[in-house]
Amino acid sequence: MKKENQAQIGTKAVWAGEKDYLVHGATQVPVIPSVAFGYDDMDEWYDVAIGKKKGHIYGRNTNPTVQAFEDKVKALEGAEAGTSFSTGMAAISNTLYTFLFPGDKVVTIKDTYGGTNKLFTEFLPKLQIEVVFCETGNHQQIEEELQKGCNMLYLETPTNPTVKITDIKRSAEAAKAVGALVVVDNTFATPINQTPLELGADLVIHSATKFLGGHADALGGVVVGNDSSLVESIYHYREINGATMDPWAAYLLLRGMKTLDLRVKRQAENAGRLAEFLETSDLVESVYYPGLPTHPNHEIACEQMRGFGGMLSFAVKGGVETVRELLPKLEYANRAANLGAVETTVGPARTTSHVECTPEERAAMGIPEGLIRVSCGIEDGEDIVADFKQAIEAVSLLLKIEG
């Protein structure tokens, strides 16, 4: 039998990180909701409290169920250290606030999740932290900005919601040349499709709420890396500021991750089929999916990804009015602000990924008001395509009649 670290990623998704937390012969990691952990030996208690000895003292700091979740993500990403959070945005914001100080500079891309974008445009500038936005995919511009000096390069690839791709290896090399920390949001790709640490990233972030959990029933975030001192710094910020993952959420996320490999591969297969169909529709202006040869970053995606993921988006003719007519006609899709679940989920960027932004801000990021984000589920791919086909045909007929 292969050792855990030699196993394939699908096997790791099922087994990794759990053995040390199984008790009483149980085959599943238990939920341990205890807020405090007691000690009779005062010296042992002290050693655990100062980190000299492994153990737990208080739930805001660490918890066995939560630690099992962190260990599994570490194994999947090939990381040495990791720490978790109550939400994905907590993971992102805590990481930024841990390492950035007044006078520092961040280089990032225009196409980031709306909440992340708000950190860059609203919150960091209040701390006198400079943020430079580069066109996503314009690697020359990214490199030119990095050469001017910076403290952090922050990437999201594929991006939310237009699934644009940035060359992680190339960008990381340029960042390392100026001593910048490289942070990559890997939520859309998942470790099944992409492992940024192997491409030069220092830290990898996930909104575990999405694909890692996969069932839309638990919030969480996680950061992993190979430099334990970096992760320990983030953990220290989090333990004091309090954005701690709940053990019940950790249990649900652990359970969901056991099927991560199966889910993500099926979702990617479905997304590819749907993207190909949408390209043939007269109602669709453009389709965004890195698996399509027509995607501007397709070649980079082929080089750094093992699969193209379950996320795609498309813009429809007629803008918001067409979106209003189209989405309610889908039978097998939740109209909701979420992604990565076993059910297909759809929604416009104006009410999902970039609801925090104004129409002008979305336009500046290249997000049309008529853009629909699709998170493909694990339904039969033929049914997903047929569902979108009937909805599009109904709307096309309606628009023709009204016209």
Image (spheres, helix red, strand yellow):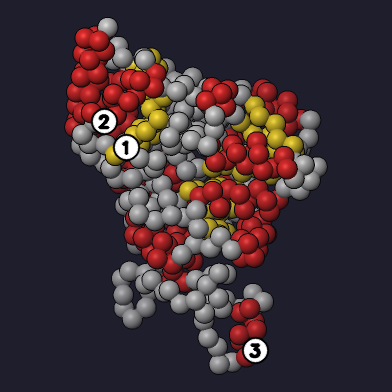
Residue found at x 39% / y 40%: 337
Q: Earlier in the sequence, mark 2 or mark 1?
A: 2
Q: Is 300 situated above or below 90?
A: above
The answer to whether the residues at label 2 and label 1 have Cβ atoms under 8 Å apart is yes
Circle 3 sits on which residue?
43
Q: Secondary structure at mark 1?
A: strand
The Cα–Cα distance between marks 2 and 1, rounded to whole angstroms, is 8 Å
Quarter of the image with the N terminus in it: bottom left
Is residue 61 in view from this perspective? yes
Q: Which amino acid is tagged 3? A: Asp
Q: Earlier in the sequence, mark 3 or mark 2?
A: 3
Q: Which amino acid is tagged 1? A: Arg
> Residue 343 placed where, x, y %?
28, 42
Q: Which amino acid is tagged 2? A: Pro
In front of the other: 283 or 63: 283
Circle 1 sits on which residue?
335
> Residue 229 placed where, x, y %?
68, 59
Residue 180 in which image quadrant: top right
Circle 2 sits on which residue?
328
The Cα–Cα distance between marks 1 and 3, rounded to whole angstroms, is 55 Å
